[in-house]
Amino acid sequence: MLKVFIGAIVCVVAFVGVGALALGSTDPGTIPPGVTAGGVELGGLDAASAAAVLEQRLGRRSSIEIDLVGDEGVMSSTAEDAGISLDVGATVSAALGAGSAEGIVDRLVRLVPVLSAEPIEVPVAYEVDEVRWTSFADEVALQFEGLCKNGRLVFDSGRPKAVAAAAGAVLERDALRSAFLDALSNEKSEVQVPLTVVEPTVTTEEARAALDEVKVALAGPLTLAYQGKEIVVSPEELAAMAEFNPSGMTSGLPFSFDTEAARELLQPRLAAVEDPPVEAVIVPAEGGRGFTVLPSSEGTLVEWSALLGSMTRVAFESGRRYVPIPTTQVPPRLTTEDANQLGDRREVASFTTYFSPADSGRVNNIIQVSNKLDGVVIRPGETFSFNDTVGPRTKEAGFDEAPVIRDGVLTPGVGGGICQVATTLFNTAFFAGLPIVERKPHSFYIDHYPIGRDATVSYGAIDVRFTNDSDTVLLLSVTATDRSVAVALAAPEWDRSVEYETSPFRDLVDPRSSEENPRRLRDPALARGTTSPVEAGVAGRAVEVRRVVRDSSGRVVHEDDFGSTYAPKDWVVRVGG
C-alpha cells in the first residue's frame, strides 16, 4: 500500500512538472487553447490572425436583417442601420486574457487534451455609435409608440361632445438596445419591441360624466350684477365663451369662461362699469425749456380673472346663477409726482435686439410684452420683476403659439418669443449699472443674442429682476417692430459707467445628434407623412461675463460675474402624425 501511494505522488509531481513547463512555454501573444468568440475557435491564434478570422466569420452580422415586431407591424433593420458594429479589437483583447484568472490546475486541465474541460466562450464585443443609435431609436419610436389620449370634451356645431380616451405606448430605449445586441450575439432574426403602456389620466367614463355636468351648466343663463345693474348672459353666449379645461375634467370644473372670447363678448357690455386710470402727461414748453405736467388720476377696472373664475364656479352650482362684478382701484403707471421728476429726464441706458419677422406669432408676443412694459416707473428702492409686470402668458392674455425651448429642442408653446424682450431688458439694466437680482441663461446657446448676456423667463418659475438702488426714479420705455425691440431707461440724473469683459467659450460639448443622423421627433402639428427641414444643432458650452460699475468719481459701485452654461442642442427633424 505504501509503495502504491508513493508511486501516485511521483506521477502527480511529474505531471505538475510537465504542466509547469507547458505553462512556461505558452506564448503570451497568442490566445489560450479552447477559447471561442461567437462560436469561432480562436485558440492558438495571435491577435492579428484572430481579428482576421472574426472579421471573416462574424463581420456579416452587421448586414443581416433583424425584424422588430410590435402591435404596429414589423420594421426590418440591420445593425448597420442602428449604428452598431463588431468591435474586433475588444473581442480579441478579451480572448487573449481568457483564463488569466484560473488556477494552475484548471489551466493544466485545459492544456492537456485528454483532460480538457468545456471551452471558454468569450462574449463578442460590439461598438455603438450613440448618434446613429439615438436617431435609429427615434425611428423605432415613430413606428411603434402611440400617443396617449385623455378623454376630453369638444364643441361640435356649438354642442358639447365627449371624445373617448386611448392608452399610449412609450419605447423602452435601454431595453431595445439590450434586445438588439442580444439578437446580434445569438443570431436571432426577430426582436419584440419593448414598450411601456401609458394609461390616460382622464378616462372615457370620466369624460362622459363631465359632459353631463357641462350640459347642465350651460343650460341656463348667468346674471352679472354691479351697483343695482344686471346683465344677463344667455346659454348661447355662455357656450360661445367656454373653453374646455383638461386639468379640470376630474375636479368638477371641466370648462372655463376665462377665455379671450369671453373678454371680447363681455367688455363692450361692461364698459360703463370701468373708468380707466389717467396717466400723467409731460408737455414740453415752447422753445424746449421747462415743461408742464397734466395730472394723473386713479381708475376703476373690472377684475376680469376674478369675474370669469366666479362665472365658471357659479355655472356648476345649484341655486341662483348670480355673479357680482368685482372691481378694483388702479393707480396710473405714471403719477403726477413721477412726471414732475421725469420732466427733465435723460437716457440712462438702452439696448436693441433684432429678429426675423417670419413668425407672426412670435412677433405678436414680442409686441404684446413690449406694450405691457412700456411706461413702467421704477421708484428708488423698488425691485422690478418681468413676470410680475407682464403676468401670465396665455391665449386669454393675447399671446400666440411660437417656439419655446423644452428638453433641448424648440417646441411650439404659448408665449414663445418673449425671451427676446427679456434679453433686451436685461442688457439695458446691465449697462445702466443696476444690481441684477435674478437672471438665468437659455438652456442652449443662441448666437443672435449677446454672448453670455441672454436671459430666459418662464411665468412662475424663472424671472428677470433688478433693483433701482439709486435715489432717483427710473422710466422704462419699450418699443417693438416686426423685426426689432428696443428698451431704454431714463432718469433725471445718473452718474454710473459700466465696464465688462467676456471670457472665451470653454467646455464645448457636441450635440447627441448630427445633420446626417438627426433626432426624429413626432409633431402632431404637421400633416401625417410630412417632415420639417433639419433644425441645426448647437454645441454646448460655458462662458463668463464680468461687470464693473463705477460712479462719476471712479469708485466701484458694483462688481459681479454672470456665468452661463449651455447644454448642447440636438439636430432635429420633425415628423408629422
Image (cartoon, helix red, strand yellow):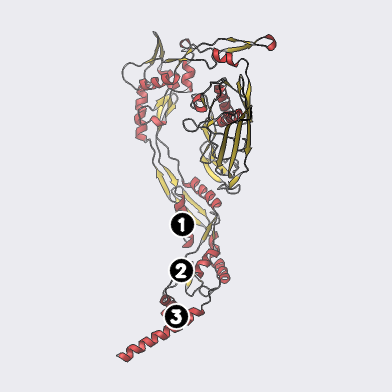
Residue 253 in the image, given as x and y percentages of width and height: 37, 27
* Front of the two marks 1 and 2: 2
Residue under label 3, please give it. Answer: 112
Q: Residue at x 45, y 43 (%)?
A: 146
Residue 158 in the image, given as x and y percentages of width and height: 44, 23
Residue 564 in the image, given as x and y percentages of width and height: 56, 39
Q: Quadrant of residue 454?
A: top right
Q: Residue at x 57, y 41 (%)?
A: 531
**Residue 121 numbered tag:** 2
10 Å neighbourhood of mark 3: few (<14), some, or many (≥20)?
few
Asked if the residues shown at circle 1 and circle 2 are in contact, with their CB atoms under 8 angstroms apart, the answer is no
Label 2 vs label 3: CA separation? 18 Å
Q: Which residue type carries mark 3?
A: Val
Q: Earlier in the sequence, mark 3 or mark 1?
A: 3
Residue under label 1, please give it. Answer: 190
Which element is circle 2 on? strand
Label 1 vs label 2: CA separation? 23 Å
Quadrant of the snapshot with the N terminus = bottom left
